Amino acid sequence: MMVGMSTLDYDVVVVGAGNGGLSAAALLKRRGCRDVALVEPSPVHVYKPLQNYVGVGLGKKSELERSQADLIPAGVRWHQTSATRVDPANNVVHCADGTMVRGADLLLAPGARINWDAIPGASDGLQGGRVCTTYLSDQLARTSEMIASLQSGRAVFTLHGQPSSGRETALKPLFLACDSWRRRKVLDQIEVMLLHDADELHPVPAIAREIRRNLDRYGVSLRSETTVTAVAGGKALMLDGPAGAERLPADLIHLHPPYAAPDFIAASGLDADGTNGFIAVDPATLRHRAFRRVWAVGDACDLGDARTGGALRPQVKIVIDNIQRSRRGLPLSHYDGYTVAPIATARGKLSFGEYDRQFQVRRSLPVPDEITARRAWWWLDRYALPQIYWHRIIKGRL
């Protein structure tokens, strides 16, 4: 009902219509929620996992995108504007168009934002230098061309820890580029390097071994505990590593972007000490630590190590269940940190590692080994999952 000239009341207000927000809105309607509002400015919905394939020439940009209007669930009120501030004590979302929407519960799924300001010179390098990335849809054609045209020289790929959206997927462009160069018989003329800011390849030993096996297979040199601090002149990386500051020139630089939380989270008091501006939720129940009617899923949350699309599926189910259980006074369900690390190691092969918050291997498929790269996992990730996403996940059916 109308509360004022520009204030609307709803049962649940969802902020963000990416994977998490859209599937949550759909599941809420399927569970009988009487009215749901969705706050999202973008007219286009992007299936981001395919960007790594498109960016190395193994897919078309048209596969990535759908009109947001065609995906909004029936009965959900879409406010095509952005959230600028949240009043969590009163469950009110302030929007850029002046509208205020209030829910009995708020579900925040705004995702994280790429923060190129954290790497001075990166934005300029992406416009005309030797820098590329598969993490921006408007850079995919350029990235594909740069990989396809490289015949010799040095190619540097970067990988960093949290905050990171789809951390393991940053290895996809590395391995797929190496596979392409090997097929064109130029890999031996290219020095390929991986820069990683951590001291270990992956916290799950079995996944780390599979990554290492493929790095060795392509002759990729690994530099651990090395952070990119800037891009110099569009053609060199400024590094901080075990040997101190260093300038590393390259002929191709693929950047794993730095991420930050949306500005409105800290401005709304939804973060806390130690969350680095991200939403302070209970990582088990997905309820905000301080506000009982505020919930959150996805990359904008301080959940530990679970910023992937695979992690969103259980998160969405649990948070919707917990909103309903909270209203009935029932004990809340718990999210165990499940996530998935799909790493394409060549055209036609992929490692499909699954693990939880304790870095224990999980298996959702009826096979003894999902971590060793196989053709079946490639077909699942490249062809089956996009169709499952468009037709089931964001419709709240999975």
Image: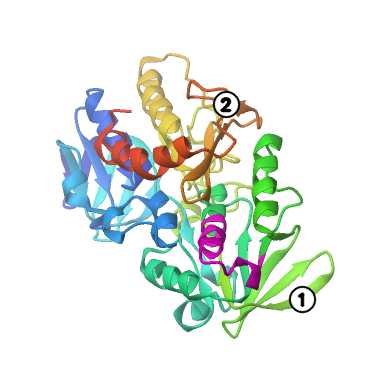
Q: Quadrant of the N terminus?
A: top left
Give the structural element (helix, strand or loop) at label 2: strand
Residue 120's spot in the image, x, y percent?
59, 76
User: Tell me, what colour scheme is on the image?
Assistant: rainbow
Task: Check disc 2 and give the amino acid type.
Answer: Arg
Q: Quadrant of residue 219?
A: bottom right
> Residue 131 at x, y = what percent?
53, 75
Q: Which residue is mark 2?
A: 362
Using the image, determine if residue 115 lies above or below residue 32: below
Q: Residue at x 47, y 19 (%)?
A: 332
- Location of mark 1 (residue): 246
Q: Residue furthest bottom?
A: 233
Position above or below: 213 against 136: above
Q: Quadrant of residue 118?
A: bottom right
Q: Which residues are magenta?
A: 174-192
Q: Is residue 131 left or right of residue 81?
A: right
User: In this orientation, does residue 12 appear?
Assistant: no
| Mark 2 Cα shell of 10 Å, populated few (<14), some (14-19), many (≥20) | some
Amino acid beneath label 1: Glu
Determine whether, in the image, residue 26 is placed left or right of residue 168.
left
User: Mark 1: which secondary structure?
Assistant: strand
